[in-house]
Amino acid sequence: MARPRPPHGHVRMRGWPNVVRLRQVIERFGESRFTRWESAAAKIDEHGPRTIDRLGFRKTMEDGMGDALHATNTYYVLPEAWRAEIFKGMNISAVNKELLQRGVFEPGSDGKAYSLIRLPGLGPRAAMW
């Protein structure tokens, strides 16, 4: 998959590196550091391999039938991983504002960059997505 580029004519878009950084983390660690969340229930596959150094959870939803079948992955990032690893040393408020404005993730019901959801094996916790 090609790296995203700013639209033609823009020398430098403010905040674009944040999108690239998040995309790189998902491309690099999407399978290994995000625990599979397989069902609508907040539970994990007890028979699957354990996720080492977890960044969050990955939920896959399939839609369509036959040749039109496609899957959509939604990544739920734990707040501490968001702050201390993915965007370490950066102004988190500014990063969240940029990513919300760009529609990279859905805001919580209060408009903030996180939401309280029931995560598999962890109960109600804040998560970014």
Image: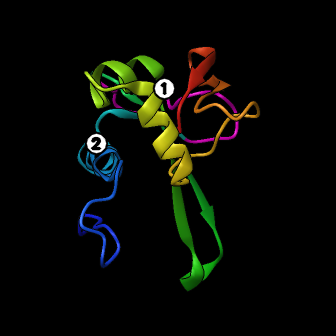
Q: Residue at x 54, y 71 (%)?
A: 70
Please report the bounds of the magenta region as a residue range. 38-52
Q: Residue at x 65, y 39 (%)?
A: 107
User: Can residue 36 be seen?
Assistant: no
- Quadrant assignment, res 100: top right
Q: Position of residue 51 (x, y in %)?
A: 33, 27
Q: Is residue 54 left or right of residue 63?
A: left
Residue at the disc numbered 2: 25
Judging by the rendered image, the residue that carries numbered circle 1 is: 46
Amino acid at the residue labelled 1:
Glu
CA gap between label 1 and label 2 equals: 25 Å
Q: Residues within 10 Å of mark 1 (few under 14, many from 20)?
A: few
Give the mark nearer the N terminus: 1 vs 2.
2
Foreground of the two, 16 or 53: 16
Residue at 56% x, 42% y is 38
Please tell me whether residue 47 belongs to the stretch shown in magenta.
Answer: yes
